[in-house]
Image (spheres, rainbow, N blue to C red):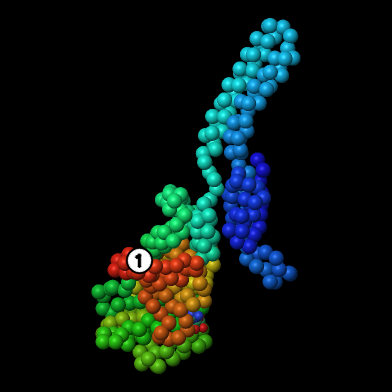
Amino acid sequence: MEYFVEQAPSHLDAERKVRAKYGDNARIMHHKTIRMGGFLGMFAREGVEVTGYISATSARTEAARKPADFEEEKKKILGSVKSEKTIDMVLQELKEIKDSLGEREAQASITAVPDSGPHPTLSALREKLFHNDFTPAYVDRVIARARSTFSVDELENERLVQDRVLEWIGETIRIHRLSSDARPEIYVLVGPTGVGKTTTIAKLAAMHAFNGSKPRKVRILTIDNYRIGAKEQIETYGNIMEIPVASVDSRQDMKKQMALAADADMVFVDTIGKSPREYTKLAEMNELLRGTGGHEGVHLAVSATTKTADLREILRQFEPFGYTSVLVTKVDETNRLGNIISILEEKQKPISYMTDGQNVPEDIHPATVEQILLTLEGFQVDRQMIEDKFGEVQRTER
Ligand SMILES: Nc1nc2c(ncn2[C@@H]2O[C@H](COP(=O)(O)OP(=O)(O)OP(=O)(O)O)[C@@H](O)[C@H]2O)c(=O)[nH]1
Ligand SMILES: [Mg+2]
């Protein structure tokens, strides 16, 4: 079997290149993102490398051609043989060959189930999904579903296809809303270093403390006493917003502070940024957080700019905290949320809030399916349709 490896700037270009070079029998098995061009590692651009093989489905045409050739061969052979006996033997042999050719033809017609390659609408869809950083497994599932859902005529209607696909993507997004009856309601934010936890805690505290006609009595706790300036950072926000801030450094201390905050409606807890690989420190912090009375209110902050593999790792390493939702920060720094959508679906985790800037308290919004779909590049989102489908039924977890 003949194999090939081709590189191109995009998936669509790679598919076109393969079709042009190897024809319709080329089958792409694997694709990966690579760095192309550049000099000494600089100025390299992102591209894709596809690997595949040339399918043998052309056997069908070969087999179809054989019966005609067979008659010619028969004439030639019969013309060259002398005795009757020899002719009988040759005829028998020819019959056997003919039977075996018939089998091959039947076989070829089975293996050559019409596979005219991907429809252009599906190729374009695949390209758009990859462009938005959806994982290969997610893309394959969407394409397989599209292939089995749409007729050839429907595939000609790109708008219809993309509207349905947006609905499918929307169905994979789960939304979490704060709806605890506990008083005070506790919101602990854990996550890797520098994702924006402290800034987000300040935004959340402000959002609820100055909630128009329904202001809530809010407290902030921080367990980050170790790094220079960390405590001051959250205290500065607290002072400006006139929200009390206290620091905690042990499980007992946490219990004490929780008792002191018994009159509050909500307690927001900022934590120390931890690399998901600092297992011991993560365990210590987990122990300290138990002083809040449980895991109910733990949420994980991840940055929208995190690489897919790292995202998967972070969600796994913070699992012992029993986080109930994921809060996505720095959405303003990327236009590609496909990796977030794919990994949250993979891990079956809901999303609660999204932050999109450094301004406190403005740059935070409760996540909605519509808002997430609107970030996708290359898709025209029919807001009314999405609102009708997902507006009311924002699934909640807890
Ligand atoms: N662009 C952008 N920057 C943000 C956002 N949220 C926070 N930041 C910035 O990210 C940087 C880190 O924010 P912090 O709130 O200190 O992050 P942290 O997770 O508390 O960091 P550690 O406590 O060190 O783990 C700051 O410069 C913030 O202004 C956001 O939504 N968008
Ligand atoms: Mg911090």
The image quarter containing residue 36 is: bottom right
Count the labels in the image: 1
User: As displayed, is residue 356 above or below residue 123?
Assistant: below
Outermost residue, top direction? 84
Q: Is mark 1 within 8 Å of ligand 1?
A: no
The image quarter containing residue 93 is: top right
In the image, 76 versus 98, the foreground residue is 76
Q: What residue is pinned by disc 1? A: 385
User: As displayed, is residue 141 above or below residue 351?
Assistant: above
| Badge 1 element | helix
Amino acid type at mark 1: Met
* Residue under the image location 44 percent in, 91 percent down: 236
Local crowd at mark 1 within 10 Å, few (<14), some, or many (≥20)? Answer: few
User: As displayed, is residue 38 above or below residue 238?
Assistant: above
Q: Is residue 245 left or right of residue 131?
A: left
Q: Is residue 313 left or right of residue 4?
A: left
* Residue under the image location 68 percent in, 6 percent down: 85
* Residue under the image location 65 percent in, 67 percent down: 45
User: As displayed, is residue 100 above or below residue 132?
Assistant: above
Q: Quadrant of the C terminus?
A: bottom left
